[in-house]
Image: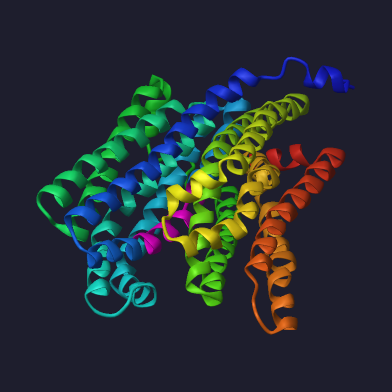
Amino acid sequence: MTSRRALFAGLPHRHALSLAWPMIVANISVPLVGLVDTAMLGNFSDAQNLGAVAAGAIVLSAAYWVLSFLRLGTTSLVGRAVGAGRPLDTISHLQRSLMLAGVIAVAILVLQWVAIPLAMSIVAPAGEVRELATTYGQIRVHSLPAVLATSVITGYFIGSQDTRRPLAIAVVVNLVNLVLDIVFVGGLRWGASGAAWATLIAEWLGLAVAVVLLWRFLDPALRARLRSWRGQGLRSRWRALLTMNADLAIRTALLYMALTFLTAAGGRISEEVLAANAILLQVTLLASYGLDGYAHAAEAMSARALGTRRLDEFHRANAAATLPALGIAAVFTALFLIGQGPFITLMTSLPDLAQTTAEYYHWAAWLPLISVAAYQLDGIFIGSGQTRIMRNMMLVAVVGVYLPVFLVPAWVRGEASNDDLWLAFTLLNVARGLLLGAAYWRLTRTGGWLRTADAAA
């Protein structure tokens, strides 16, 4: 049996870094474009258009976030096929995921004429803002087929141990969106509609780039397989893909519900708490950019290692992706604690809001270090295809920890506390890490990792 010293000697840190850094850079580019959107609308439009884009983006971002299971499931299946030395199967997984993405996109485009006005009636105030938000949503939603297809292709690249091409796609989309924002909003003064058209064009161009990069990435045999959609057994072997995607959709929806609840519950306490929590969530979002990179590395490396059926390589890959993530999380927490004053000053000049933010700042500052285990274990369980466990543990964490920790004290005292709200959110991440950690230990002892890999083969 491999000793612990041999297990952790010479870990593949270089490979983990090569997978992580492009995803970190790609993630960082996203909020920069959001800042340009806001700046263009704030300087060359009005409050109604700015509010409309904010409301429309909330609805579409929620939908796209839940639909991210297409990328995650593709990464897992492709990565295990790569590790098992079955390159032709990677194309079959890609084709099935693209077919599923197409069905979902068509269904949403058919329903959007009812769904978008209904959603905007919930998130946007009546009047001009709601009308502009509805128009924004109905323009942007037509990029959904491109977004979903690009997501699947990105999952294929990550499963194939390549994160530089996803970085190239993200950079193209964000740069084009930025330039078109300047032209449509700043130059032509199209307001919310201009922001929507800029994103629509950028995301379809991103798909074109993704297709070109995919074609150049594949060897002749895989290109021939991709061109052929008949006689490849695509009518069968859907169970693994659909099961994984259903589990991931439920897990992601539960996580989004927890974040939404934090915002909504904070708003019920006071408008100032709502604004302070919005600033603090930006702190946690900033940290997630660094942590997500190594979580993606864990997805890719764990999937390929399981495909080889070498559990020693599986555990070594997980260690190589996790140890740097722990270091990054510690650095984020230290920087947030040291830079509390300057960060709050940068985010707001309102004295009362700054004071409220400072009162609860410690929760967000410690969260990177507290939640890093949940991030990394999510990546490992996605890569290994253990999505049912992920779904169940998230359900236990939300229903058994998050909601009771906030609601029970509020019921006993007769009023809600923002400290209770942040304690609940913190313990949610602790519970996710502990529950998945216990599941990791159990699967290691019982040999469950290989059974899942065999079931999806």
The prevailing secondary structure element of the residues shown in magenta is helix
| Residue lying farthest to the front in this orientation | 351
Residue at x 30%, y 67% (from the top left corner): 110
Q: How many marks?
A: 0
Q: With respect to residue 53, does 285 lie above or below?
A: above
Q: Going by the image, does 328 lie left or right of 274?
A: right
Residue 153, image quadrant: top left
Give x and y (percent) for residue 386. 68, 46
What span is in magenta?
Answer: 57-70
| Residue lying farthest to the left in this orientation | 188
Q: With respect to residue 354, does 225 lie above or below?
A: above
| Residue lying farthest to the bottom in this orientation | 414
Residue 350, visible in the rendered structure: yes
Colouring scheme, one of rainbow, by chain, secondary structure, one colour: rainbow
Residue 142, image quadrant: bottom left
Membership of 69 in magenta stretch: yes
Residue at x 54%, y 55% (from the top left corner): 280
Q: Going by the image, does 320 lie left or right of 171?
A: right
Give x and y (percent) for residue 251. 60, 57
Residue at x 34%, y 77% (from the top left corner): 121
Membership of 18 in magenta stretch: no
Residue 232, visible in the rendered structure: no
Give x and y (percent) for residue 17. 57, 23
Q: With respect to residue 344, does 383 lie above or below?
A: above
Q: Quadrant of the N terminus?
A: top right
Q: Going by the image, does 310 lie left or right of 365?
A: right
Residue at x 58%, y 42% (from the top left corner): 336
Q: Quadrant of the C terminus?
A: top right
Give x and y (percent) for residue 43. 20, 53
